[in-house]
Amino acid sequence: MSRTKLFIAAISTAALLYTPLSQAESLVDGTYQSEGDSNGTGKCTLIIKSITESRKYGDESFELESSGDGACEWSAIGLSKSYAITGGMVTSGGAPAFVKLAFPFGPAGSRLEMTAYDLDGSIRVNEVFAKK
């Protein structure tokens, strides 16, 4: 084998090893939009950003921020475990709650189900989001 072919093979191998790592970090990061009601109101925008610090008891940590009308206004910090993200959230009114994000088709899918729970365990809101 020529020296050029060996060099190209070495570079290609290194690139292939690096690619899955970079894609794994960005699978769930992004902007998600809820459907809203039939009148086109109540649409929520959810932004998920990875926090680069590694955690001992979770796969990754995330900053979650939702905007829109009414119940859409909240922010949270969450930890993922097998791409189900759970975390504490604070609404625009200052009410604390918990949030759970699930990816029914895996982290590479474009669908996200969000459920917010009050401190007593009752469901506050349940929304479905699609990745933009």
Image (cartoon, rainbow, N blue to C red):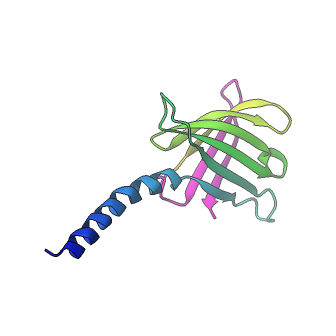
**Residue at (75, 54) in percent of width and height:** 44
Q: Please state which of residues 59 and 8 is positioned toward the viewer in this rendering.
A: 8
Query: For residue 7, which quarter of the picture?
Result: bottom left
Q: Residue furthest front?
A: 3
Q: Give x and y (percent) for residue 4.
A: 24, 75
**Residue at (69, 23) in percent of width and height:** 120
Horizontal side of 96 relative to 86 (left or right) equals right
Number of callouts in the render? 0
Horizontal side of 64 relative to 41 (left or right) equals left
Q: Give x and y (percent) for residue 46.
A: 69, 52
* 10 drawn magenta: no
**Residue at (31, 67) in percent of width and height:** 12
Q: As displayed, is residue 5 above or below residue 106?
A: below
Q: Give x and y (percent) for residue 29.
A: 58, 53
Q: Please state which of residues 51 and 125 is positioned toward the viewer in this rendering.
A: 51
* Residues rendered magenta in the picture: 104-132
Q: Quarter holding the C terminus?
A: bottom right
Q: Residue furthest top?
A: 120
Q: Please state which of residues 36 and 48 is positioned toward the viewer in this rendering.
A: 48
Horizontal side of 39 relative to 98 (left or right) equals right
Q: As displayed, is residue 69 above or below residue 115?
A: below
Query: For residue 43, which quarter of the picture?
Result: bottom right
Q: As displayed, is residue 124 above or below residue 13?
A: above
**Residue at (65, 57) in percent of width and height:** 32
Q: Quarter holding the N terminus?
A: bottom left
* 106 drawn magenta: yes
